[in-house]
């Protein structure tokens, strides 16, 4: 066992540590976000304005201490977004200093400590998420302070134990889901405390601090009777949206890569970091540096939960606590290089940090100089749309729209039906991604590998607003399925053998374009089109081809158009797929035309 005989006190920061602090401060200040970007940022900002976790302000499990700290800053700054960004920048700087202190005692060396702290705080993940209006930097600050206190437990006695209890509770208060890793970490750390008094002090400090943030959370959810249902609901959401759907079709290797490699950027930066961490881990085992066990427990449990449970598309954020251990081990690995060439450790760290900065530059430059695409889109809507406009909002933009869009808003599927026969109000489709509708407006940041690896599956890089022309709207009465691949892309709608639509005549003719999918089990299909009950056209559509026709529309308030196909099939019964719907042809386009 390696025990540092030095007294438990805060050492004067070294020149290297001060230079590192300046680098982290510069990185955060030079990459401040221009606007809100991520879904969770919206929920945290709404929580600052009115704390209501039952209605996702913010989302469960409530983040009570984060909201409390944000409200305190907002009292002075009077801007929830600026308050949260300020909080995250300050927490990053305090977290860096705490991490240097913790790593110095765990690694018994200033150089390894500074390099480890820099690799973490200037990693691609922290460069992207460190200054955002999220819960990560405050939680990581408290984790770093808890690790620094734990490293001093053998000599620090009651003060160090008290600090450990306060900071461990603080980390959970900012991100309650960290409790699964922080509680075991704290228990392991207390093994190194000498005597019963420090352990009782840690327990008392943890309990009292937890009450400070737990009671407001309990009140906000309506008392003890509602608390367990509140947590159960969150567990169900995690199971559905983190564990099940995002992992469908993804291999275990893909999930592991998202958690282990992507937080460190491309292969040419990730592999050297992981190799240095492996070398550092071997060195720590050989030195029997058992004081690093709390950090190892924290990282091991957090990473295991991530690999088994959490959403891989959010892996670069969920993996941040485990990156503390990787960065520490990589710092020790760099220190091992210095034994043969003293400058090698700093050179390796400098090259890695430079690689991190170059890799993330396209994303960070766009984020710090222009509003995010969702914000751009909604600012355009506020300038250009009529006061009575209606926006059909895709699910992954619902939070942004609820906070930023002062118009009537409805989900896409519901809105397509509700406003199909609307005669005057302009209707727009607000979507994440490119649009297939005519005259759509697109708002985007530049594409980059960093955006794909470090964001939530590439969400919010491109946002579109698509006006839905009156001439293209119709109500699906029967046998007409949803737009595929999405309503925004609007490629086609499958129809059954007896399908019908209703529309408001605005032009004298209706142009219809139909296609027979190549998977159909016959060489062609015949479709009879009737308008207002009278036959209007017959189309023979060869397999894999399209046919179009124009039919006359009568003067009326509404007109029904039917499509009767001679043949239909169920793909799951013909080895053409797993779809169990009965299908005939695809509706590719429908538009009223003429003077």
Image (tube, grey):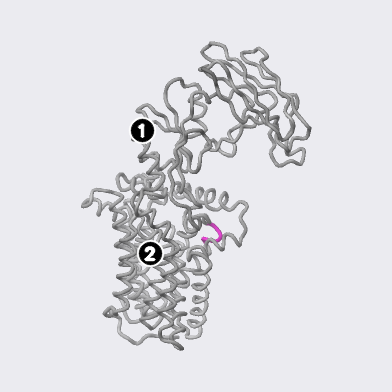
Residue 15: percent from left, percent from top: 29, 79
The residue closer to the viewer here, 333 or 458, is 458
Say what secondary structure mark 2 lies in: helix
Look at the image and tell me whether residue 204 can be seen.
Answer: no
Neighbour tally class for label 1: few under 14, some 14-19, many 20 plus, Cα within 10 Å = few
Q: Is residue 408 visible?
A: yes
Secondary structure mostly seen in magenta is: helix
Image quarter of the N terminus: bottom left
The disc, 2 or 1, on the residue closer to the chain's N-terminal end is: 2
Question: What's the CA distance linking mark 2 and mark 1?
Answer: 42 Å
Front residue of this view, candidates 532 and 202: 532
Element marked by disc 1: helix
- The residue carrying mark 2 is 140
Q: Which x, y percent locates residue 164?
A: 34, 70
- Residue placed most toward the observer, 251 or 584: 584
Does residue 235 lie above or below 531 as drawn?
A: below
Dot label at residue 384: 1
In this view, 83 is above or below 187: above
- The x and y percentages for residue 318 are 47, 59
* Residue extending farthest front: 595
| Image quadrant in which you'd find residue 208 | bottom left
Say whether residue 26 is magenta.
no
Which residue range is magenta in the image?
Answer: 305-309
Please, which residue is most extreme toward the right here? Answer: 522
Q: What crowding class fits label 2: few (fewer than 14 Cα within 10 Å), some (14-19), or many (20 or more)?
A: many
- Give the residue at x 52% y 81%: 282
Q: How many marks?
A: 2
Question: Which label belongs to residue 91?
Answer: none
| Whole-percent x, y for residue 335 in the image | 43, 82
**Residue mark closest to the camera, 2 vs 1:** 1
């Amino acid at each position: 066992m390696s025990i540092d005989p030095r007294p438990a006190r805060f050492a004067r920061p070294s020149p290297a540590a001060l230079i590192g602090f300046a680098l982290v401060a510069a990185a955060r200040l030079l990459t401040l976000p221009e606007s809100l970007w991520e879904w969770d940022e919206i929920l945290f900002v709404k929580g600052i304005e009115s704390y209501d976790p039952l209605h996702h302000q913010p989302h469960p499990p409530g983040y009570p201490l984060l909201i409390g700290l944000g409200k305190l800053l907002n009292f002075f700054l009077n801007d929830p977004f600026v308050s949260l960004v300020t909080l995250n920048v300050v927490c990053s700087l305090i977290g860096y200093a705490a991490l240097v202190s913790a790593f110095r005692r765990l690694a018994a060396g200033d150089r390894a400590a500074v390099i480890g702290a820099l690799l973490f705080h200037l990693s691609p993940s922290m460069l992207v998420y460190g200054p955002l209006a999220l819960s990560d930097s405050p939680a990581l600050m408290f984790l770093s302070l808890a690790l620094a206190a734990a490293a001093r437990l053998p000599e620090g006695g009651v003060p160090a134990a008290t600090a450990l209890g306060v900071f461990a509770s603080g980390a959970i208060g900012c991100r309650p889901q960290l409790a699964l890793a922080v509680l075991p970490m704290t228990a392991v750390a207390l093994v190194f405390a000498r005597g019963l008094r420090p352990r009782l002090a840690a327990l008392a400090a943890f309990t009292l601090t937890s009450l400070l943030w737990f009671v407001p959370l309990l009140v906000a959810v309506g008392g003890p009777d509602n608390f367990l249902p509140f947590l159960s609901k969150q567990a169900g959401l995690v199971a559905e949206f983190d564990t099940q759907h995002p992992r469908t079709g993804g291999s275990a290797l893909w999930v592991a890569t998202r958690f282990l490699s992507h937080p460190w950027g491309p292969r040419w930066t990730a592999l050297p970091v992981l190799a240095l961490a492996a070398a550092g881990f071997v060195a720590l085992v050989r030195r029997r540096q058992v004081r690093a066990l709390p950090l190892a427990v924290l990282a091991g449990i957090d990473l295991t939960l991530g690999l088994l449970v959490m959403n891989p598309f959010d892996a670069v954020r969920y993996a941040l606590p485990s990156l503390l251990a990787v960065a520490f081990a990589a710092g020790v690995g760099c220190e091992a290089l210095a034994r043969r060439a003293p400058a090698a450790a700093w050179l390796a760290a400098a090259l890695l940090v430079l690689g991190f900065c170059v890799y993330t530059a396209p994303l960070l430059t766009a984020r710090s100089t222009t509003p995010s695409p969702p914000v751009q889109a909604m600012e355009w809507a506020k300038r250009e749309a009529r006061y009575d406009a209606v926006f059909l909002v895709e699910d992954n933009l619902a939070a942004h729209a609820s906070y930023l869009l002062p118009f009537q808003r409805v989900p896409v599927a519901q809105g397509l039906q509700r406003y199909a026969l609307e005669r005057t109000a302009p209707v727009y489709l607000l979507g994440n991604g490119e649009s297939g509708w005519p005259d759509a407006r697109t708002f985007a940041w530049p594409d980059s590998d960093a955006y794909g690896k470090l964001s939530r599956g590439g969400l919010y890089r491109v946002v579109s607003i698509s006006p839905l022309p009156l001439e293209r709207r119709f109500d699906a009465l029967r046998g007409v399925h949803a737009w595929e691949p999405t309503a925004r892309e609007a490629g086609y709608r499958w129809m059954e053998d007896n399908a019908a639509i209703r529309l408001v005549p605005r032009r004298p003719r209706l142009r219809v374009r139909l296609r027979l999918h190549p998977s159909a089990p016959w060489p062609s299909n015949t479709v009879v089109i009737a308008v207002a009950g009278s036959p209007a056209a017959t189309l023979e559509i060869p397999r894999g081809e399209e046919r179009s026709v124009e039919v006359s529309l009568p003067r009326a308030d509404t007109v029904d158009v039917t499509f009767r196909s001679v043949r239909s099939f169920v793909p799951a019964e013909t080895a053409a797929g797993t779809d169990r719907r009965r299908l005939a042809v695809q509706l590719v386009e429908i538009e009223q035309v003429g003077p």
